[in-house]
Image: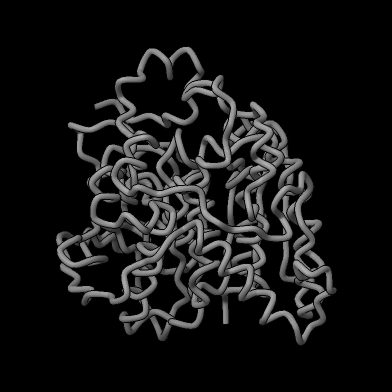
Amino acid sequence: MERRNFLSLPMVVMQARSPYVSWSWERWREITGENRPALRTEQTGQAALADLLRFQSGKAVARGDWPTRRASIEQTVLAILGAPPENKPPLAPRILEEVKLPTHTRRKLVYQVEPGEFVPAYLLAPHKLKGHKPAVVCPHQTVQYGKDEPAGLAGNPRLHMALELVNRGYVTFTYDAACFGERHDPSTGHYGEAIPFYRKHPRWSMMGKMAWDLSRAVDYLQTLDFVDSAHIASIGHSHGGYTTLFAMALDPRIAVGVSSCGFDTFRHDGNTWRWSHATALMPRLGFYLSSPYIKNGFYAGVPDSETVQTPFDLHYVLALIAPRPLFLSTSDEDSIFPNAGWSARQALARLDPVYQLLGAGGRLGSYFFRGGHGFPPEAAERAYAFIDRWLRP
């Protein structure tokens, strides 16, 4: 099967290939019986991004109040992401292959994320390891190459992040996300694997699952005697970018994060279709749509008035990362997230006061560029330098 970034296809192509899209929000509702969450916050009904340093009562948040405010934000985000499994099974890793290359060794392995579910992955380690090395997880973008792209085995050379970073001296790790790479069933369509996932986990979400699997990657890295378990970062582009953000929000062990072209806020994007219908990531957001005209090949930047009723926006997720170092690389000409530049600037304007409150203003970085949905060399160098600054002990 041809490997392509299906969320980036033009509308006419998406319509022509619509039988490939096996995911259906309506099928999710049939499976789960879910209804719109009975959840109202200070963000509900507001077109602008809500102030992160103000309680729903209107009271300003002081530094000592932040744990309480953070807990309320986390509770809201988890209401949309759903409940993960209560227990983790043993990792039970198995090494399948080891290849020695000029600068590093590439090890192919599988590790267990849920009982009986093993994820294929690559571990890249520099030669002549001494002591404990910082490590970087590199989740991939929305392509069926999966882990092969960050590892430098396929895809866009500019997105060979795991390869680039191992050559900078880091231990790197990349794996196939659910629905991609070796975890994709060719007999199903785009996000087709989400249907059996929701039969198994009707109260969870694919976005929560993506964060869970990255967290399990951290679990694995922390078992390695040559990895500095206190210095683990995550970097990703597009799908890998927002996977990094959600995983950091839920797992405090991820010390540094970089997201490249990783989001549009719901309100600046104009609707929540991409998160609930075009993908299977956060289906509960599908209750905050009203327009009958938005379709699978026609949603980017198409506004829907019901979006203002969503009880959170993506700056809430960023707030859960504070005060850890975070870098956002954003295109002002992004065809996938057409309002990304505006979204990121507005989100950063809300996020920066949180970092300032926590005495971490210097830990928030950003870079804006033209040139489409990508990771150009100047963005990559800034991102890697940011990781160098904060990850090396």
Q: Quadrant of residue 335?
A: top right
Residue 221: quarter of image? bottom left
Q: Give percent across and percent down for residue 135.
A: 45, 71
The figure's colour scheme reads one colour
Looking at the picture, how far across and down is residue 270, in whole percent? Answer: 67, 34
Camera-side residue: 81 or 223? 81
What residue is at 17 percent from the left and 31 percent from the top? 187
In percent of width and height, residue 49 lies at 76, 52
Q: Is residue 338 above or below residue 383?
A: above
Quadrant of the frame with the C terminus: bottom right
Residue 116 appears left or right of 333 = left
How many tags in the picture? 0
Q: Position of residue 244 (x, y in %)?
A: 51, 58
The residue shown at (25%, 60%) is: 100
Front-most of residues 196 and 188: 196
Which residue is pictured at 43% across the width and 47% down the height?
281
Between residues 178 and 207, which one lies in front from this camera angle? 207
* Quadrant location of the N terminus in the rendered image: top left
Query: Where on the picture, by quarter, is residue 264?
Result: top right
Decide if residue 21 is in sight here.
yes
State whether residue 234 appears in this view: no
Residue at screen point 32% across, 54% down: 202
* In this view, 190 is above or below 382: above
Front residue of 329/349: it is: 349
Quick check: 25 left or right of 223? Answer: right
